[in-house]
């Protein structure tokens, strides 16, 4: 960067962006049936689906569809829909 440009007023600062508050997503993530869900990989989530009820899996599906929208997670949740105990294959 040319040091003389800022002194001559030829550059201007980039406009500051407003950040959306993260407390709403943190609050929604805190009541998920899998602890630390938002930080897990698709494979880790698949491994944990087996012990969840259908209602809990539906809750996870709604959260995933509204947030990260990971195809692998949504497919795994769809495959487990209506199944009493979901086993990863």
Image: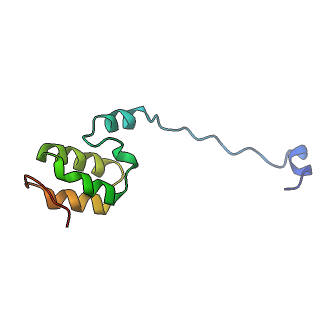
Q: Nearer the viewer, residue 33 or 71?
A: 33
Task: Say which residue appears at 17% left-offset and 59% top-offset.
Answer: 78
**Picture coordinates of residue 89, whole percent (x, y):** 19, 67
Task: Say which residue appears at 23% left-offset and 62% top-offset.
Answer: 75
**Picture coordinates of residue 42, whole percent (x, y):** 33, 58
Determine whether 83 is above or below 52 in the image: below
Count of numbered tags: 0
Horizontally, residue 21 falls left or right of residue 41, namely: right
Q: Quadrant of the N terminus?
A: bottom right
Within the image, what quadrant is residue 59 found in?
top left
**Picture coordinates of residue 47, whole percent (x, y):** 26, 56
Task: Say which residue appears at 37% left-offset and 56% top-offset.
Answer: 41
The structure's colour scheme is rainbow
Horizontally, residue 85 falls left or right of residue 60, namely: left
Q: Nearer the viewer, residue 79 or 22?
A: 79
Task: Say which residue appears at 80% left-offset and 48% top-offset.
Answer: 11
Q: Nearer the viewer, residue 86 or 4?
A: 86
């Amino acid at each position: 960067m040319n040091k003389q440009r800022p002194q001559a007023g030829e550059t201007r600062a980039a406009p500051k962006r407003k950040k959306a508050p993260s407390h709403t997503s943190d609050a929604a993530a805190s009541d998920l049936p899998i602890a630390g869900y938002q930080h897990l990989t698709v494979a880790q989530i698949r491994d944990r689906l087996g012990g969840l009820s259908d209602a809990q899996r539906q809750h996870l599906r709604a959260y995933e569809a509204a947030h990260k929208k990971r195809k692998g997670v949504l497919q795994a949740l769809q495959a487990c829909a209506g199944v009493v105990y979901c086993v990863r294959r």
